[in-house]
Amino acid sequence: MELREIWAGVAELIGSIPRTDLLWLALASLVLGWIGAALMKRSRVLGRLLGGASTAILVGILVTIVLQMSRLDPRIDLAVPELGLPPQVVEGDETRVPMAQDGHFWLKAEINGVPAEFLVDTGATLTAVNEDLALEAGLEPRRGGIPIMLNTANGQVTAQIAPIEELRFGNVAARGLDAVIAPNLGDVNVIGMNLLSRLASWRVEGQTLILVPNNPQDDLVRVGE
């Protein structure tokens, strides 16, 4: 392999790294730690101070990453209002969704009061909305959040995480749910497992998807007809 090919591969790898506040903060903390180590011979106190600051910053970044990743799994979901991470709650009554003619389950929903259609995709980890809907619904990427790499029909793209104030469909209401604002998604919006896994249960009977929140009532709504 020629040097030019190696350099092109390295440049592509670096270019694929999401540019985020956390990335620049991590780089700054590494530089700070290097400076602290270099100053140890001249001023041990200053060197230790800079080294300690570098370590504290890296620990803070690690905690932020753990908190964000924990929100993908309801078993270890953490709500930390001080860091702008609201609790993710899915509640309401049982809702039945008939299968559409294309063989998929579609929901007529409202996201922050804006009507939109969502495809139920059990293969998707996160709920995703297209850029136009995100703009209309007032979704804003979480500052300091870690971008998610998504595989789409148009290749791999970087998507930002944003909290949804309220997502309603049928008898179900989801609040504080994390979603990704996905570029190149077209007009499609997706309900992912981060919502479905917070239900008491969900199942398919025949051509009907049955969603059962925790503490369900007897009021049934068919959506998507």
Image (cartoon, helix red, strand yellow):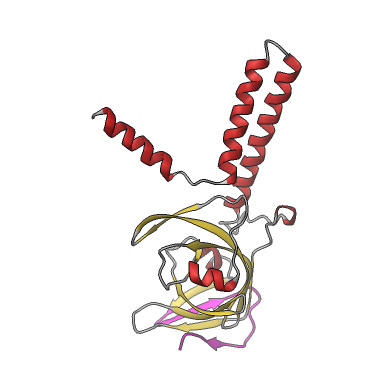
Viewer-side residue, 52 vs 69: 52
Residue found at the very far front of the displayed protein: 4
Q: Position of residue 40 (x, y in %)?
A: 68, 14
Tell me: 10 left or right of 190: left
Q: Quadrant of residue 120?
A: bottom left
Viewer-side residue, 126 vs 117: 117
Query: Is 223 in the magenta?
Result: yes
Specify the quadrant that holds the C terminus: bottom left
Please count the marks in the image.
0
Residue found at the very far top of the displayed protein: 41
Q: Position of residue 24 (x, y in %)?
A: 57, 39
Specify the quadrant that holds the N terminus: top left
Q: In the displayed structure, would residue 72 be above or below residue 96?
A: above
Q: Which residues are magenta?
A: 205-225
Query: Is 96 in the magenta?
Result: no
Q: Position of residue 190 (x, y in %)?
A: 47, 69
Q: Position of residue 216 (x, y in %)?
A: 63, 79
The residue sitting at 48% across, 82% down in the picture is: 97
Tell me: 218 left or right of 2: right
**Dominant secondary structure of the residues highlighted in magenta in the image:** loop
The residue sitting at 34% across, 84% down in the picture is: 101
The residue sitting at 60% across, 69% down in the picture is: 138
Q: Quadrant of residue 78?
A: bottom right
Viewer-side residue, 162 vs 209: 162
Residue found at the very far left of the displayed protein: 1
